Amino acid sequence: MNIPHDISKLTPAEQAALIEQVESRESRESGRVRRKARRFVVQPPRAASLHIDSGQGSRSAVVLMRNLSAWGCSFVHPVFVYPNSRCQIELRAIDGERVLACGVVVRCSLVGGRIHETGMKFDQALDVCGFIAEAAAAHTDDPAWAEGRQILTILKVAIDEADLQAATDAIAKLQRWRSGLQDAA
């Protein structure tokens, strides 16, 4: 696969193949991995903006999100990033809100060709439920999350049926619900 410098230009099929290549490599590697929080696969893969300060200047890149957890994320892109580099990644929530997460690169490894898989650790925990529908559904034991799951289901159906008004209403409802959770915390 010929990888352009801007991987967001890959077709959805090429993006899926690239992520599959990284996943199969990871499953072959052994070793003990310590994590603070459950990882959620970003499906389908989404582009995000990464801003890197490596100490030798700043640069920006479009990356392809692979997975996300409360304390970090993994992404692929065609540039090596030195571990311990400070960076910020701009994530887009389910409701369209853009959120900037700051952190540090903990690893960067060559997958093949020019493609690197990079792990980033966030400085502060992120509410993954706002970004991954499956994360919201994972709160099945908590009745406070029932309304959020219901709203996400309505949103998914509206998107699947291309019902713009219902999707807009569901996003507004989701924003109000998230605000209520943050107020209660």
Image (cartoon, rainbow, N blue to C red):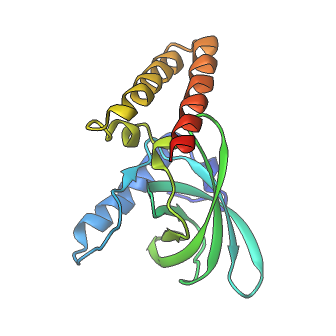
Question: On the image, which quarter does residue 135 sit in?
Answer: top left
Looking at the image, which residue is at 54% across and 46% down?
Answer: 46
Q: Measured along the vertical axis of the image, is residue 110 above or below residue 102?
A: below
Looking at the image, which residue is at 60% across and 34% down?
Answer: 95
Residue in the foreground of this view, choosing between 114 and 166: 166
Q: Is residue 182 left or right of residue 119?
A: right
Q: Measured along the vertical axis of the image, is residue 119 above or below residue 144?
A: below
Residue 16: horizontal and vertical position, in percent? 43, 47
Question: On the image, which quarter does residue 162 sit in?
Answer: top right
**Could one spot residue 177 in this view of the protein?**
yes
Looking at the image, which residue is at 45% across and 55% down?
Answer: 66
Residue in the foreground of this view, choosing between 105 and 128: 128
Question: On the image, which quarter does residue 102 sit in?
Answer: bottom right
Residue in the foreground of this view, choosing between 58 and 99: 99
Residue 178: horizontal and vertical position, in percent? 55, 36
Q: Is residue 149 left or right of residue 83?
A: left
**Could one spot residue 113 in this view of the protein?**
no
Looking at the image, which residue is at 68% across and 83% down?
Answer: 54
Residue 14: horizontal and vertical position, in percent? 49, 47
Residue 89: horizontal and vertical position, in percent? 63, 61
Outermost residue to the right: 57
Residue in the foreground of this view, choosing between 184 and 63: 184
Q: Measured along the vertical axis of the image, is residue 61 above or below residue 167?
A: below
How many discs mark residues in the rendered view? Answer: 0
Q: Is residue 79 left or right of residue 108?
A: right
Outermost residue to the front: 184
